Image (cartoon, rainbow, N blue to C red):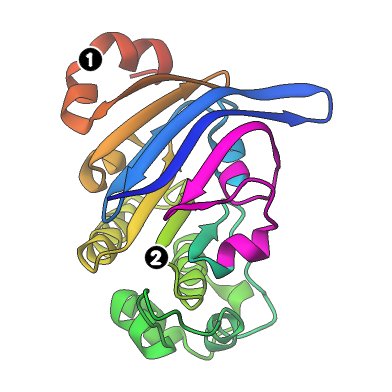
Amino acid sequence: MLYLEAQGVHTWYDTSHILFDVSLEVHEGESVCLLGRNGAGKTTTLKTLMGLVPARSGAIRFNGTSLTGREPYEIARLGVGYVPDERLIFPDLTVRENLELGIKKGRASGPSWTVERVYEIFPVLIPLDRRLGGYLSGGEQQMLTIGRTLMGHPSLLLLDEPVEGVAPVVVQELTRQILKLKGMGLTILFAEQNMHFAQEVSDRAYVIEKGRIRFHGTMHELQANDEVKSKYLMI
């Protein structure tokens, strides 16, 4: 079932035109990646889908409901969770307190999350339960941020460069954890530069460059397309 759809989206920052006629779709239960270099438009795409940056034109629909013109809190209430690349944890609160801040009333159609269930997905956080967020490593903070977003009971998760700046061992752990979430039926769209990570967790890929979608296909098709990889992904 088509779950998230963007058609002909144009986004501006003040007088700067950033996204040009961006169209993409994510089906229920899929994991789809948006690949591109720094400054290609990945973050702007996710922020536009979340309503943090309004689309100047085009249409965005989630589970049959139009998101165009909606505020981010309204989109979150519909079941969309957003994990920014800045992580934005509260450094003076404990891990558990950070998670509890993300609690929202559960939706009948989506999974229900508790702190204990988050710890089942991210067991590395269990011994850190009472540690202040500011004393976590980058990888631990990333897991905490994803866990806090899950506490809002999303059915669609938007992840902005989840493995940027974390150690290879953490990338491996996040790979396992995201595959677990996908296995639980969560629909995932994430922006990323790490091609290897994307191959491990994605069904399909979009490649964006200078605010335009340049490629769409399965991960196998992308892996076999040397021209796209060398031209737009520096591979």
Q: Nearer the viewer, residue 227 or 137?
A: 227
Q: Mark 2, residues whose alpha carbon is within 10 Å: few (<14), some, or many (≥20)?
A: many
Q: At numbered mark 2, what does the secondary structure look like: helix, strand or loop?
A: loop
Residue for point 20% across, 64% down:
183
At label 2, the amino acid type is: Ser
Residue for point 71% across, 42% down:
54
Q: Nearer the viewer, residue 105 or 195?
A: 105
How many numbered marks, from 0 up? Answer: 2
Q: Residue 189, image x and y in percent?
A: 40, 47
Q: Mark 1, residues whose alpha carbon is within 10 Å: few (<14), some, or many (≥20)?
A: few
User: Is 164 colored magenta in this rendering?
Assistant: no
151 over 194 or under it: above or below: below
Task: Please give left or right for residue 76 compared with residue 36 in the image.
Answer: right
Distance from disc 1 to disc 2, alpha carbons, whole Å, reads 32 Å
**What range is drawn magenta here?**
48-76
Pointer 2: what residue?
Answer: 155
Quarter of image, res 147: bottom left
Q: Residue 232, image x and y in percent?
A: 42, 16
User: Is 71 colored magenta in this rendering?
Assistant: yes
Mark found first going from the N terminus, 1 or 2 = 2
Task: Please give left or right for residue 49 compared with residue 15 in the image.
Answer: left
Residue for point 29% across, 54% down:
28
Q: At numbered mark 1, what does the secondary structure look like: helix, strand or loop?
A: loop
At label 1, the amino acid type is: Asn
39 over 95 or under it: above or below: above
Q: Residue 110, image x and y in percent?
A: 37, 74
Q: Residue 188, image x and y in percent?
A: 36, 53
Which labelled disc corresponds to residue 225?
Answer: 1
Task: Please give left or right for residue 105 compared with residue 57 in the image.
Answer: left
Which labelled disc corresponds to residue 137?
Answer: none
Do we see residue 165 in this rendering? no
